[in-house]
Amino acid sequence: MSRTTPPRPVDVEAAFPELAALRRPATRLNPRRGTPTVHDSSVGGPMLWPADEAWPVCTAPHKRGSGHRYSDVVREREILERAWRRDPRSGPNAEEAGTLAGFKRGRHAPYLADTDPIPLLGVAQLYRRDVPGLPDTGEGDLLQVFWCGFERHGDTRHDLHVQLRRRHSKDVTRQLMAQPVLEVVGRPELVPSPCVLHPEKIVEHPYFMTLDPTLWDRIDAWEGTEEDEGPQYVSDLSTAPGWKVGGYIAWALTGPGPLPCSVCGAE
């Protein structure tokens, strides 16, 4: 796949040499719809999971019986994809529109108690061979990412619950064939569609709110306003959007905050 990140419009390190010491490599994953297998790096694809190992679950207390049926989320995407491919101008026909209208949020699993274990969603699996810069922790060549289908965790009760698994792929000799799925999700956006990856190496610079205030003031004066149509540090010169490994966090929603490792305390 050809490079998808456009070239930087200017050399920001030439304008602000201090940024050269702060550059970080990153790998944009560039997920695209596809049919990955357990032996591929993917987003939303099947996980390479041992048949004799328990699947990750969420037991944190929160409501888990109301939301969108997982099966409806998947079915809706299938219908829409087929419809728009068939007719790019009008999309779903009357029969398909009727089916889609029946997919509604509701109390679809009232029998689930607030602490019943529910399967986590397999979000991504990354083989080190495919993703430059994936940290080598000595725990294996495969990193697997899971999250709960509800954003009802943490002190704010609006956070995701994420779990990571690392393993040596060669040790999985008997695979789990039918992977568990949860019945209900809080939002359809939390269900990733199966995508193959097209890793691309890039360089990033820190989000503006984490820079030294003096440096940020200089950058702010240099870039002018958006109406000037010149390059903007935040959107053109610092962090890349989308799925990635490494690089810097874009703190657009919350502002910078500490994210120490719960085991060793490192960033």
Image (cartoon, helix red, strand yellow):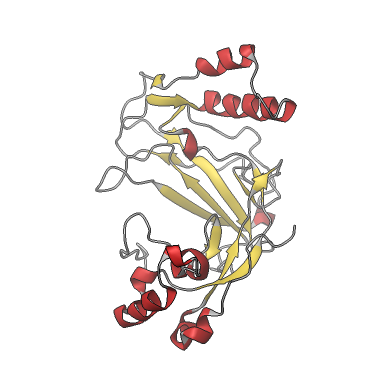
Which of the 4 quarters of the picture holds residue 60?
Answer: top left
Residue positioned 38% across, 58% down in the render: 252
**Percent x, y for residue 230?**
50, 69
Observer-nearest of 132 and 171: 132
Q: Quadrant of the C terminus?
A: bottom left
Q: Is residue 137 left or right of residue 68?
A: right
Q: Nearer the viewer, residue 89 or 68?
A: 89
- On the image, the x and y values in percent for residue 178 come to 62, 32
Image x and y of residue 258, in percent: 31, 65
Count the labels in the image.
0
- Where residue 119 sits: x, y (%)? 47, 35
- In this rendering, does residue 193 appear at all? yes
Left or right? Give the position of 82 relative to 157.
right
Task: Look at the picture and state if 245 lies above or below 119.
Answer: below
Residue at the far front: name it. 228
Q: Is residue 160 above or below residue 103?
A: below
Quarter of the rendering occupied by the N terminus: bottom right
